[in-house]
Image (spheres, helix red, strand yellow):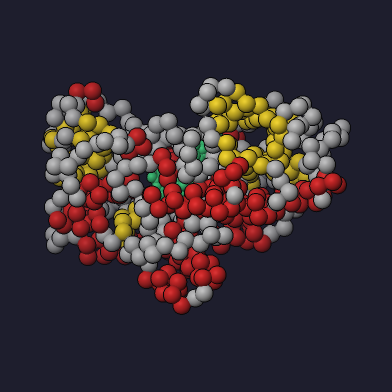
């Protein structure tokens, strides 16, 4: 289909073919069959995170019953699944729903300019394979671009890195042929990636040391969830997926709420869990007692206590100290101790990036993200016809993205039914106080907080981090509310899809 300017026109442009983008496509297929859409993907593969990360042991750190799509429940045995199975699940979903036919690989969206006169986006994409530029127009953009840079991870400027004679690896760029069997490995970091890597590498490495500046809360969970397994056995398949999802969503939310309301109680519960896993007399105070409250930063989950088993077996150990400098042989710590290593893994995290680095503007005025509020955590104040898939920090990403997809398809259908082509969240309440979007104080979040939009102190500008509240706000509530302004161009232009004809 062509726009009045002669360019290809899409009703909906989905950015990214990761877990969220494939979910968005599937919702469009089932709820907006009238819509022309394409999924523009910068890389040459489906899967996003689950294709990019290839480090040993890569797996989910939240349960798959809630990380899987609600329309295609995860029916695997394991609640915590390996990266390859998750990637396969995303690919199978794309094939089963027909979304795979709408993906345009090697297309990175770089610019998007909203024209109020035309009620459409002028979009520029770069062909990452042949270097050409593609220009199209779109009625609506649904950004499913994840939340971090793909070209590199976060790496602090450690002194003396170039002196180290061994191998330095970042988990985001894991060399396929890295041989660490029988080698001494130091993993810098104590986040989800570090605690995943360490037990996995410890199977064959001579020894793996986790070097952390400060401890993280770590919880051991059975890889196979007994309640989920029972529900899978006793309920018909069409009910079990939803029942398990709700069970996991509610219990996860319950533990989050308990952490926020009774942090001391939660600390005691978490400590008891760790005491049971570690050898008698282990220095839990130094290595596993964080200085913050549970859920001020993401809790790390380890399936079947695999990290603790490696520590108990002596194949892994923890050092809590600071890097002074890299040396030829390893790392000199601020305490004066030196850790010798053949391989150093810098599990130092991600560099956050919002809306895939797209430069967006509305009628020529650049969208200044830090000055924008998010509407229901999925649209931006003053930016028409633009939604984004941002998941939870305290629960599975897909729980929120599923609700967002459902809302976006309802919004699109509402606009089509009413013939109103522009939907813009507008804040008219001067009492709404902005605050950071993500309620975590982890280093990777605070480092980038100034590049992200904000949330507001009142509905619908708050980001709840609560599936139950979002279920009400996104799924149960009407599309029309005081903040959502529907309009048409002042001088009517022919809509690209004639509304009457399309109905
Ligand atoms: C190692 C790791 C483990 C994780 N484990 C969990 C977990 O267990 N549970 C959980 O809830 N979350 C987890 N997460 C968060 C995880 O990223 C999300 O769960 C989910 O995979 C995000 O899916 P997404 O499609 O939104 O983003 P991504 O997976 O990041 O995919 C985004 C896609 O968009 C493409 N893209 C980006 N910008 C553009 C652009 N401008 N133009 C075109 N294409 C673009 C990218 O190339 C990519 O393919 C994990 C993250 C990491 C890094």
Taking the spot 51% from the left edge, 27% from the top edge, the residue there is 128
* Farthest residue, direction bottom: 234
- The residue sitting at 84% across, 33% down in the picture is 493
Q: Nearer the viewer, residue 231 or 105?
A: 105
Q: Residue 219's quadrant in the figure? A: bottom left
Which is nearer the eye, 120 or 449?
Answer: 120
Count of numbered badges drawn on the protein: 0
**What percent of the width, then of the height, locates residue 321?**
21, 40
In this rendering, position of residue 283 left or right of residue 356:
left
Q: Residue 350 placed where, x, y %?
A: 40, 38
Q: Is residue 153 visible?
A: yes
**Can residue 404 be seen by looking at this rendering?**
no
- Asked which quadrant contains residue 184, the reply is top left
Q: Describe residue 312's horizontal placement relative to residue 500 as left or right.
A: left
**Quadrant containing the N terminus in the rendered view:** top right
Q: Write down the quadrant of residue 153 in the picture.
A: top left
Residue visible at 34% across and 56% down in the picture: 301
């Amino acid at each position: 289909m062509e726009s009045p300017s002669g360019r290809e026109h899409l009703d909906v442009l989905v950015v990214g073919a990761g877990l969220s983008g494939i979910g968005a496509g599937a919702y469009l297929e089932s709820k907006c069959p009238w819509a022309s859409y394409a999924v523009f993907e910068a890389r040459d593969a489906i899967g996003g995170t689950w294709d990019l990360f290839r480090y040993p042991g890569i797996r989910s750190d939240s349960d798959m019953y809630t990380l899987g799509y609600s329309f295609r429940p995860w029916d695997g045995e394991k609640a915590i699944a390996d990266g390859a199975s998750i990637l396969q699940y995303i690919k199978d979903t794309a094939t089963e729903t027909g979304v795979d036919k709408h993906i345009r690989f090697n297309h990175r969206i770089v610019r998007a300019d909203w024209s109020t006169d035309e009620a459409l986006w002028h979009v520029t994409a770069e062909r990452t394979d042949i270097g050409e530029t593609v220009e199209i127009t779109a009625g609506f953009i649904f950004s499913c671009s994840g939340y971090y840079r793909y070209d590199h991870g976060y790496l602090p400027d450690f002194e003396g890195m170039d002196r180290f004679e061994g191998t330095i690896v970042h988990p985001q760029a894991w060399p396929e042929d890295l041989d660490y069997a029988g080698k001494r490995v130091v993993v810098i970091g104590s986040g989800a990636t570090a605690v995943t890597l360490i037990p996995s590498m410890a199977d064959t490495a001579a020894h793996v040391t986790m070097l952390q500046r400060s401890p993280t809360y770590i919880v051991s969970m059975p890889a196979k969830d007994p309640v989920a397994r029972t529900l899978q056995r006793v309920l018909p398949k069409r009910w079990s997926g939803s029942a398990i999802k709700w069970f996991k969503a509610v219990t996860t939310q319950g533990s989050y709420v308990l952490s926020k309301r009774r942090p001391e109680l939660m600390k005691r519960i978490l400590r008891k869990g760790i005491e049971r896993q570690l050898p008698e007399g282990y220095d839990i105070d130094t290595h596993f007692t964080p200085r913050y409250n549970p859920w001020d930063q993401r809790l790390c989950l380890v399936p079947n206590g695999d990290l603790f088993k490696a520590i108990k077996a002596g194949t892994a150990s923890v050092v809590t100290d600071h890097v002074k400098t890299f040396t030829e042989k390893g790392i000199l710590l601020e305490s004066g101790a030196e850790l010798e290593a053949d391989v150093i893994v810098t599990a130092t995290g991600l560099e956050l990036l919002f809306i895939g680095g797209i430069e967006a503007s509305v009628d020529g005025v650049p969208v200044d993200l830090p000055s924008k509020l998010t509407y229901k955590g999925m649209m931006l104040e003053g930016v028409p016809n633009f939604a984004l898939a941002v998941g939870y920090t305290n629960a599975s990403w897909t729980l929120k993205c599923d609700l967002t997809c459902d809302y976006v398809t309802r919004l699109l259908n509402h606009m089509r039914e009413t013939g109103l082509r522009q939907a813009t969240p507008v804040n008219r309440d001067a009492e709404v106080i902005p605050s950071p979007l993500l309620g975590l104080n982890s280093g990777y979040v605070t480092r980038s907080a100034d590049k992200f939009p904000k949330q507001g102190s009142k509905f619908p500008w708050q980001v709840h981090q609560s599936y139950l509240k979002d279920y009400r706000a996104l799924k149960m509530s009407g599309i029309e509310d005081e903040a959502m302004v529907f309009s048409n161009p002042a001088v009517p232009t022919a809509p690209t899809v004639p509304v009457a004809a399309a109905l």
